Image (cartoon, helix red, strand yellow):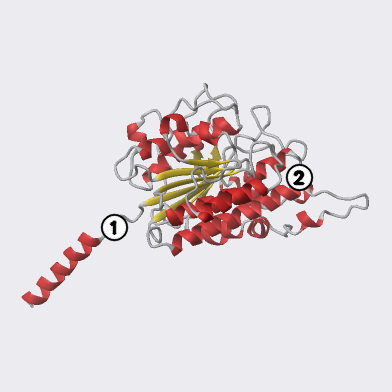
């Protein structure tokens, strides 16, 4: 009996010594300007375009459904069949919950600054290419033991290097028509060539696909512990009043998120040890007349949403009776990998209540 007990104790010590942190990595994906209305209710027929005979645009109609639950699952199947069931979603007004920005401006750069630095800053009041005066959680994590040179970002908007202040932070950031900033492999050079070969529909950069390809290649080759991916197509189509293409961009974004998660589960460094966080930088107008716009003069543009999935996220589903803010997102990024950004930066908001 003593020998048996001794064997059990030795086995326990061996398993403890070999145990790894449950959540070692975090991947953050943002969908620029994606409204909570579509997030929780799916496509709205009131926004569908009709021809002279009243026939609805077939591109938009494919997202139609009888209930909000059916419509949102058509638009974002991974979000609603995996993330919402195995993780958590914040900001559903039908559940007496709310998620919102606190910066009072309700557009991109102020939203990303609040999201990544943990506090609104009145100095960040435009989308101009001005280096962020605030230290983002990505820069802070890059200076923490075990995270140095293990943090990277990718985004279709060419303002991202300024949001992350790459001159000061020295974070590697792929953006615009150069998704891979320092290509070293044939695959990475091909991704950059692909981005350059796409039509330059927007002057600031390419569509989302090359950005996602570059980020996934980063996971496979450089193994970052903290990865940020900024998707922007949906916001651009919304500004052009193209509800059909806004919906299509959202469907692609959901597919990209699924592909990223599938990649993470296929790699031993990430499988079961990575948290996925998803959100948006601002909302949009809440009517047919103003849905395409946002900013401080557009009612409802301050309202957002957030989602989380991973080993540090209990499966609580759609959270009820809860108000959260975008400023809580930065500390959450750090918290899921065991770091306390809020304690280090006391002016920032605390992390989301995931437990």
Instruction: Identify the residue shown where x is 57% and y is 24%.
Output: 125
Provide residue 80's location: percent of width, then percent of height. Answer: 57, 58
Per the rendering, the mark at residue 20 is: 1
Label 1: few (<14), some (14–19) or many (≥20) C-alpha neighbours in 10 Å: few
**Quadrant in the picture for residue 351:** top left
Q: In this rendering, does residue 284 appear at all? A: yes
Residue at mark 2 to residue at mark 1: CA–CA distance: 47 Å
Residue that protrudes farthest toward the top in the picture: 123
Picture layout, residue 161 above or below residue 147: above
Rendered-image quadrant of the N terminus:
bottom left
**Which residue was labeled with disc 2?**
242
Picture layout, residue 277 above or below residue 62: above
Instruction: Identify the residue shown where x is 93% and y is 49%.
Output: 52
- First of labels 2, 1 by sequence position: 1
Q: Is residue 105 left or right of residue 203?
A: left
Q: Is residue 332 left or right of residue 281?
A: left
Provide residue 31's location: percent of width, then percent of height. Answer: 59, 45
């Amino acid at each position: 009996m003593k020998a048996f007990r001794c064997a059990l104790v030795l086995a326990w010590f061996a398993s403890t010594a070999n145990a790894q942190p449950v959540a070692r990595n975090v991947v953050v994906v943002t969908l620029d300007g994606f409204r909570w209305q579509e997030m929780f209710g799916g496509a709205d027929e009131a926004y569908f375009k009709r021809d002279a005979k009243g026939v609805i645009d077939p591109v938009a109609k494919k997202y139609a459904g009888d209930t909000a639950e059916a419509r949102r699952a058509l638009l974002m199947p991974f979000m609603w069949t995996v993330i919402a069931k195995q993780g958590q979603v914040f900001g559903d007004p039908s559940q007496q919950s709310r998620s919102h920005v606190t910066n009072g401006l309700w557009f991109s750069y102020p939203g990303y600054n609040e999201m990544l630095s943990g506090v609104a800053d009145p100095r960040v009041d435009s989308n101009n290419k001005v280096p962020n005066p605030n230290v983002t959680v990505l820069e802070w994590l890059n200076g923490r033991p075990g995270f140095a040179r293990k943090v990277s970002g990718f985004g279709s908007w060419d303002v991202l290097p300024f949001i992350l202040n790459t001159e000061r932070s020295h974070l590697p950031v792929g953006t615009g028509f150069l998704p891979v900033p320092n290509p070293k492999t044939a695959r990475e050079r091909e991704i950059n060539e692909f981005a350059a070969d796409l039509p330059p529909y927007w002057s600031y950069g390419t569509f989302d696909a090359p950005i996602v390809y570059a980020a996934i290649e980063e996971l496979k080759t450089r193994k970052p512990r903290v990865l940020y991916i900024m998707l922007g197509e949906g916001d651009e189509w919304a500004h052009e009043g193209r509800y059909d293409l806004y919906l299509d961009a959202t469907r692609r974004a959901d597919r990209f998120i699924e592909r990223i998660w599938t990649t993470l589960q296929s790699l031993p460094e990430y499988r079961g040890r990575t948290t996925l966080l998803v959100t948006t930088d601002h909302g949009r107008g809440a009517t047919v007349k103003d849905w395409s716009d946002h900013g401080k003069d557009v009612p409802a543009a301050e309202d957002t949403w957030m989602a989380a999935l991973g080993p540090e996220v209990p499966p609580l589903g759609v959270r009820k009776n809860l108000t959260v803010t975008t400023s809580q997102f930065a500390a959450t990024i750090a918290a899921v990998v065991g770091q306390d950004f809020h304690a280090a930066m006391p002016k920032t908001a605390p992390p989301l209540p995931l437990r």
